[in-house]
Each structure stands twice: as structure tokens, then as C-alpha cells.
Image (cartoon, helix red, strand yellow):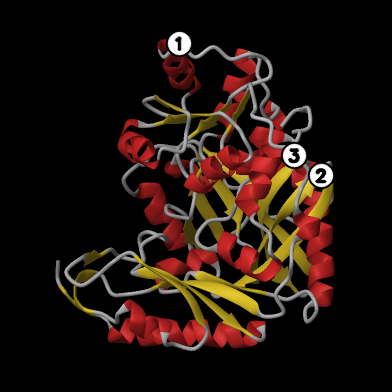
Amino acid sequence: MTATQPFRGDQHHEDPVVVLGWKPTEVLTALVEHGARVICVCEPADLAAAEKAGTADRIVTAASVTDAAEVVGALAREGVSLAPGAVVCTADEFPVVTASAVGEALGCRSWPMPRALALRDKFVQKQLVRRAGIRVAQAYFVERMADLAQVPFPLPYVVKPFDEAGSRRTTVVRTAEEAARLQGGAEDPGPWLVESFVPGGELHVDGVVRDGELQMISVSRYLNNVVDFRTGGLVGSTVLDRDTHAALHTAVTDIADRSLRALGHHDGVFHLEVFEQEEGLVFGECAGRVGGARVDTVVRLKYGVDLYDEWARAVLAIPTAVAAATRDERTFGWLHLPAVAGRVTSMPSVEEIRERPGVEIVEMKVGTGDVMADTGRDINARAGRVVVSGDSAAEVDRRLRALAVWFRDSVEVEPA
């Protein structure tokens, strides 16, 4: 955000905070709890749920929250007049650049466009990080799949759309035959980002930065690299305690600090991904939002820091609450419960799942009679989610993997 006047006590903000997108819903709650008057711009599909939640002071419907013209038009139609003190922001990945454009167009406070673009466009992001001397994958973009022959670096490489989130349409191309199939297959709308494949285990780093200084950092190791979900890899991660992984925490803190400075992200929260190699860490990508799945929960349980609250504090220029947080000596991890695609005829109950070692939280998405989606096609396809605790990262990792095997073996499905 651009500079703001500090929030004073429990004073109600006179100027509204315009939030593009209804999700994640926690950010609206956090803003309201700090006295903000929230105008939520949501898409028609989210209108009923947003109204039912009753969190926002006002709800405006736009055909697309990623289209600046649609957002500005929707605000105008509703007679919303914004003074320079108003804020336009988003906690969603997709409308980041839109929020910046709308804020600048209406003369309100918002992220500067260079910062918004750096945190959204992964090609621009990698250019900035590379210029800062940080190890990162090579990047190239093509207008059409047929142009993959022009890629200036060798296989393997990764192909993804620029509107990507969650690796849903990301493809790892390992052989010339696979590249040829993509080039000659049905054409999907481009352009496409092509990155050199980075080997090594994948970490995600989540934290808070204020005035350009890191306030807290959480380091987690994925159970499997994110792109491996297509081949049956588990979707989940385990927090690595800084006391038992001191050297790694030092290296991660260094690359996070340098990366955030390169991207111009000096106030807010972040979700950064890096790869471990013998030569050191390699930058993957970075977003200026709270990480998905149950990243927020494990950070809160382990470090006592509410990342959504910290996001809202940065938007409202309220001092961070990190210093008052209490850390838990245990460590935590989360997991998407896997299951075979089909109509569920039998599955463990919530009570049975809670009886498994270390299980703290169970959130079920699918029940008996429901259709389980193909987890190899959508990283968010899951039977449910769990959060598990343990005395060490190694123990949490074992518990998560054992839970995944037990649950998958316990679910029975029939063709849907």
C-alpha cells in the first residue's frame, strides 16, 4: 500500500476499504474487527454467500473482479464515490493488478502498479529476482503452444498459463515427445509461461513484512513438490521448527528478505516458494497474500500469528501484533485427505479421523453419497483437510503420510 495515516485506537475508519473478491472471507472479518467500513466487490456467483455472511458494510456486484473496467463501472452504477483516503485492495491472487489499476484510476490508496505486477506476473517477477542476484529458473513466454520450439533453454521445462493459481494447468515437459504432443495438440488460449525445471525439494515460506523489515517467518516443507499432485503426490506440508533447522531458517530468511526487496513488497504478508539444492536455495515464486489450504492455521498454532489479521493491519497501517504472539514448542502440518475419484459408498467418520495420532482439526468436504473429484486434475480436489501436531517435523511428516494411506485405503467408491 502507499503510505497511510496510523490507525488510532478503536476509531471507526471514515474512508472505506474496497476489497475486490469475497474470498478469502477471513480478510473481511479482520478488516471489520479493526473498525474498517468495507465495500466488497464480488462476482455474481458469490453474491448470495457474501450477503448471507453479512460481513461487508456494502456489497457491489461486478461481472469480473479481474476486469478494471467492470469494477469501476459497478462502483459508478452503485453511486460509490471514493475520496483519496479510501483504500482499494484484494487478498485474492487474481485481482491484484486490477486493484492497483482501479485505485490509481480513482485516486485512492492502493499498491503501486510495479509492486502489483511484480507479485502477480511470474515472468516479471523472475526478471526482478534474477537482477537482484538470486538463483531462479530461466523464464520465457510463448503466444501459442506451437511456439514451444522457440524456447531457448533445454528440456525439461515447465509450461503454465499466466492466470495460473494452484498449478491446475501446469505441465512438466520432460521429453521431446511430450513437447511435440503439446505443440500439435488442441490449442488453449495463451500466452504461456515456460520455465526451466528446477530440481530439489520444495519449501513454502510464510510471514509478515513491515516497513521493509521481516517481522516473522515460517518455513514448511511440502510432503511432495506441488506439481507432483498430478501423479499421486500428497498435497500438504510440515512446519520446520527454527530451533532444529537453524541453518535452513537462516538461508530462507536471507532469500526471503532479498526477494521481497527486489519485488518492492515492504508492507503486508507473503507466501514464498523455494527449492532446496546442495548449492543453496532457488527462488520459485512469491505472492503478497496468505498461503492457501491450512497454511494460516499451522502458522497460528505454531507461532501465534494470525496472518489474515496481519494482512488487515498492513492495509490499515496498524502496527503489527507479531511481538505479542506466543509460540508453541510442538510443530504442525496439514494435509488434503486423498481418495479415489467416484461416488463415495463408505468412508471414515470425523470421529475416526480425530482418533488418529496427532490430529488437531478435521474439515470434511465429501461425505458418503457425494462424488469425489479426480485429485490428479485439480490440486484443491480432496475429501477433506486435516491439521496434525507432533513433537518434531519428522513425527508430523510420518503422521501425515500414515494418515493419508489409512484414509485412502478406508474409502470405498463406485463409478460416478
Q: Which residue position is annotated with label 2?
A: 261
For label 1, the SS is loop
Specify which label sits upstream in the sequence, 2 or 1.
Answer: 1
**324 lies left or right of 106:** right
Residue at position x 65%, y 82% from top? 393
Residue depth check, mark 2 versus mark 1: number of the one nearer the observer: 1
For the question of whether residue 297 can be seen, the reply is yes
Residue at position x 59%, y 42% from top? 33
Q: Nearer the viewer, residue 252 or 4?
A: 4
Residue 109 appears at what percent x and percent y?
Answer: 68, 23
Relative to 217, say whether 76 is above or below. Answer: above
- Looking at the rendered structure, the kind of residue marked 1 is Gly
Q: Which residue position is annotated with label 1?
A: 79
Which image quadrant for residue 128? top right
Which image quadrant for residue 364? bottom left
Relative to 134, say whether 147 is above or below. Answer: above
Residue 41 appears at what percent x and percent y?
Answer: 45, 28
- Looking at the rendered structure, the kind of residue marked 2 is Arg
Residue at position x 28%, y 74% from top? 340
**76 lies left or right of 200:** left
Specify which label sits upstream in the sequence, 3 or 2.
Answer: 2
Q: Which residue position is annotated with label 3?
A: 318
| Mark 3 vs mark 2, CA separation in Å | 21 Å
Relative to 56, say whether 157 is above or below. Answer: below
Which image quadrant for residue 326? bottom right
How many numbered dots are placed on residues in this image? 3
